[in-house]
Image: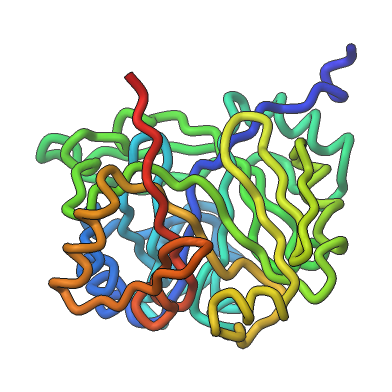
């Protein structure tokens, strides 16, 4: 089989929330019991300049077992902000990243399926590693916003994963283990199916409220009708089409719920599970599930 027709084994890597107020947004996640990495200024291409330059935003991350949650906020409003158009729409989930082993081979396969993805580009940022600053390096395949406007899709090749998945960053008071699923909202879920197929999603399951599919590596993508989402969570998103929920697993979910209660975080408990409302997460629903422990 030619390389370009092989489905790359993509898996969930991370999901990013983008807001204006960096400090306040990070504090919300810390209140939920996440241990966040130190502030790291984002760098990348800037229009009109040849070299990488600092962007307007910085990030902090909740590093999990094999995935992570990223928080992005503005720290210098005068610098170039590649996320400005997304923040202008609403604060919340705007970046879905899937991991690949090699960006070049992944792009060869994906570009045979869709024209909505751009060729791989290098990216970097600095993170503390054993008390010393180290440059983390990635190669990223970004989606074209004009063609897939509901979120920024990203296929990432980690070149320095050992810098990010440090054990000291993986310990969380709330027992967080893994990002296991993301949920998109759309008036017509079928409009997002071409994206899922292009990314190699499989095992499609239809329901009254939408459709779900699994990535070839790991992780699940859900698409819910806007009315089904509003009925399930009692919350109608201001932007109907977009990514509006993530599902995170926790070791000892009962202890997680106790911690959140002690910190005054309201958790809804309904037949379909436990979840935290957008006011406590920076603009999205966070569904809480029990982690599957492996021996």
- Which one is nearer the viewer's eye here, 285 or 93? 285
Q: Residue furthest front?
A: 271
Q: Residue at x 86, y 63 (%)?
A: 191
- Residue pushed farthest top? 1
Q: Quadrant of residue 251?
A: top left
**Residue 50 point in image, percent of width and height:** 56, 54
Percent of width and height locating residue 213: 72, 45
Q: Considering only vertical position in the picture, is 274 above or below 199?
A: below
Quarter occupied by residue 292:
top left
Looking at the rendered image, the quarter that the N terminus falls into is top right
The structure's colour scheme is: rainbow
Which residue is the extreme one toward the left? 131
Say if 43 sits above or below 120 in the image.
below
In front of the other: 202 or 30: 202
Q: Nearer the viewer, residue 36 or 52?
A: 36
Where does residue 146 sit, x and y in percent of width and height? 80, 67
Residue 35 appears in the picture as rendered: no
Q: Residue at x 71, y 27 (%)?
A: 8
Please state if 185 lies on the left or on the right of 123 as rendered. right
- Give the left or right position of residue 91, taking residue 168 as reference: right
């Amino acid at each position: 089989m030619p390389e370009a027709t092989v489905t790359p084994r993509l898996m969930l890597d991370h999901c990013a929330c983008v807001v204006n107020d960096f400090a306040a947004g990070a504090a919300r996640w810390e209140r939920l019991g996440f241990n966040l990495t130190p502030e790291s200024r984002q760098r990348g291409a800037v229009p009109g300049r040849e070299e990488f330059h600092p962007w307007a935003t910085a990030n902090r991350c909740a590093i999990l077992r094999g995935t992570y949650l990223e928080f992005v906020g503005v720290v210098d409003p005068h610098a170039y902000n590649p996320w400005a158009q997304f923040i202008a729409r609403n604060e919340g989930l705007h970046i879905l990243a899937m991991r690949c082993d090699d960006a070049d081979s992944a792009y060869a396969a994906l570009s045979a399926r869709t024209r909505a993805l751009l060729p791989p580009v290098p990216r970097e940022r600095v993170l503390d590693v054993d008390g010393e600053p180290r440059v983390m390096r990635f190669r990223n395949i970004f989606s074209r916003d004009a063609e897939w406007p509901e979120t920024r899709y990203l296929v990432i090749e980690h070149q320095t994963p050992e810098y990010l998945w440090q054990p000291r960053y993986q310990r969380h008071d709330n027992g967080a283990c893994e990002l296991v699923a993301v949920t998109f909202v759309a008036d017509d879920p079928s409009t997002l199916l071409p994206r899922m197929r292009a990314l190699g999603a499989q095992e499609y399951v239809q329901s009254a409220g939408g459709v779900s599919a699994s990535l070839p590596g790991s992780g699940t993508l859900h698409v819910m009708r806007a009315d089904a989402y509003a009925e399930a969570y009692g919350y109608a998103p201001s932007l109907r089409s977009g990514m509006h929920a993530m599902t995170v697993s926790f070791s000892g979910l009962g202890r997680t719920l106790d911690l959140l209660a002690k910190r005054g975080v309201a958790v809804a408990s309904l037949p379909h599970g436990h979840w935290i409302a957008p006011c406590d997460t920076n603009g999205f629903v966070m569904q809480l599930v029990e982690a599957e422990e492996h021996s």
